[in-house]
Image (tube, helix red, strand yellow):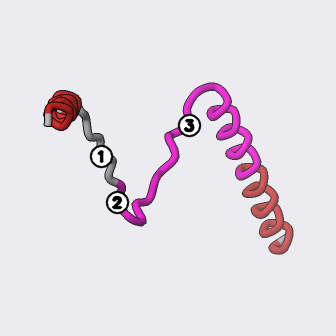
Amino acid sequence: MEQLKGQMRYLEEHTAYSTLTITLYEAGAATTPPDEWGFVKALKDAVHNLVNAFSAVVRGLGWIIRWL
C-alpha cells in the first residue's frame, strides 16, 4: 500500500509540471515566398527591363519597315 501511494505521489508531482504543445496547420494553406529585395533583385529587374525594351524596339522597327 505504501509503495502504491508513493507511486501516486510521484506521478502527481511530475504531471503537475508537464507541458503540452500543440501546433495547428490549415490544410491546403498556400504559402508565399518572401519578397526579394536588394542589389541582386534590382540588377535582375534592370536586365529584364532592358530585354523588354530591346524587344519593343525590334518589334517597332519591324512594323516601320513593313510600311516603308
> Which residue is nearer to you in this view: 3 or 66?
3
The type of residue carrying mark 2 is: Glu
Determine which residue is flagged by label 3.
Answer: 36
Secondary structure of the residue carrying numbered label 2: loop
Q: Is residue 40 magenta?
A: yes
> Which residue is nearer to you in this view: 19 or 65?
19
Mark on residue 26?
2
The type of residue carrying mark 1 is: Ile
Q: Residue at x 71, y 52 (%)?
A: 52
Cα distance in 3D space between marks 2 and 3 = 26 Å
Quarter of the image for the C terminus: give it. bottom right
Label 1 Cα crowd, 10 Å radius (few <14 / some 14-19 / many 20+): few
Residue 4 visible here: yes
In front: mark 2 or mark 3? 2
Q: Residue at x 69, y 38 (%)?
A: 44
Determine which residue is flagged by label 1.
Answer: 22
Cα distance in 3D space between marks 3 and 1 = 32 Å
In front: mark 2 or mark 1? 1
